[in-house]
Image (tube, rainbow, N blue to C red):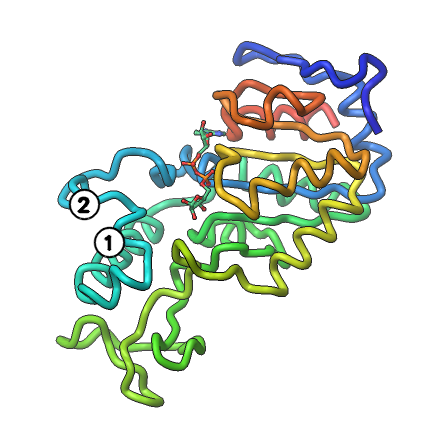
Amino acid sequence: MNPPEGHLSRQVAGAAFSIPSSLLQALRCARHVTVLTGSGISAESGVPTFRDAQTGLWSKFKPEELATRGAFQRNPKLVWEWYAWRRELVAQAEPNPGHLALVELERRVSGFTLITQNVDGLHQRAGSRDVVELHGNITRVKCFEEDQVVPTWQETDETPPLCPRCGGRLRPDVVWFGEMLPADAIDRAVAASQSCNVFLSIGTSTLVHPAAALPFEALQHKAMVVEINPCSTPLTTRAPYALRGAAGQVLPRLLQML
Ligand code: APR
């Protein structure tokens, strides 16, 4: 379903953007709304986006150099400590108005699927239910050998800690570069992208597949695709609406006008 003016990407510029009435109307009568979020929605919670420069002692590393099986096998202590630092960052962060607006949107619409590339768990802490986590969750750990989640673990002087079941090393329950996404998560995400009336792509650079393909899948299935991002991405010129702003400002405004 596209706005009357067709595919022309509608740049709604400025911080005090007026949300197009045709978009509000589409949301009001949507049978199913699907949302894809990236690290941009957590930026206003103080969690650096994935491609922000790393800070502090981690500034000399690129995430791509640490978030791999090979990096963990070469230096499990370094990789474990990087994730421990990020867990600490996330624990100190709070969900922001963008996360909270999505909880409200879920309440307002009849069908809703929230898909996230983020591993920070902030959507769940905001109150979103049934979040489809494409890339896992940094607050969970699993056994590197068994590839099974370990519900609780103790930090010991052994870094990384060892699996209480088999003695293998523990690793974060996140999807590393080169690893497969959880099959059930990607299947749900594709189905929700193909069957929705409105697809909101929020705070993602739309660079990393297969997540980056989801908004285009929605476009192909005649959904109204809306991008919410202060910057342009490969989706911007294809999305009928590109709301140029921060998620923590655009989303509450959208809910206010809905
Ligand atoms: N509101 C909305 N968008 C924002 C905000 C904000 N306040 N701040 C930044 N952004 C946008 C940036 O313009 C950028 O387009 O968020 C996007 C963040 O892009 P990335 O850092 O590439 O993060 P993401 O798209 O989530 O990365 C996808 O890549 O490396 C993998 O697994 C990693 O999940 C990650 C995936």
Q: Is residue 155 rendered to the left or right of residue 182?
A: left
Q: Is residue 246 rendered to the left or right of residue 5?
A: left
Identify the residue under disc 2. 58
Quarter occupied by the C terminus: top right
- The CA span between labels 1 and 2 is 9 Å
Displayed-image quarter of ligand 1: top left
Q: Is residue 65 rendered to the left or right of residue 233?
A: left
Q: Amino acid at mark 2?
A: Trp
Would you place residue 154 above or below residue 174 in this image?
below
Residue at left 36%, top 45%? 93
Say which quarter of the image contains residue 51.
top left
Q: Nearer the viewer, mark 1 or mark 2?
A: 2
Residue at left 46%, top 54%? 121
x and y percentages locating residue 214 in the rendered image: 64, 42
Would you place residue 122 above or below residue 238 in this image?
below
Q: Are marks 1 and 2 in contact (CB under 8 Å)?
A: yes
- Viewer-nearest residue: 53 or 43: 53
Q: Secondary structure at mark 2?
A: helix
x and y percentages locating residue 52 in the rendered image: 32, 34
x and y percentages locating residue 189 in the rendered image: 66, 52
Instruction: Give the residue at the far bottom of this rendering.
Output: 165
Question: Mark 1: is the Cβ under 8 angstroms from ligand 1?
Answer: no
Tell me the number on the disc at residue 85: 1
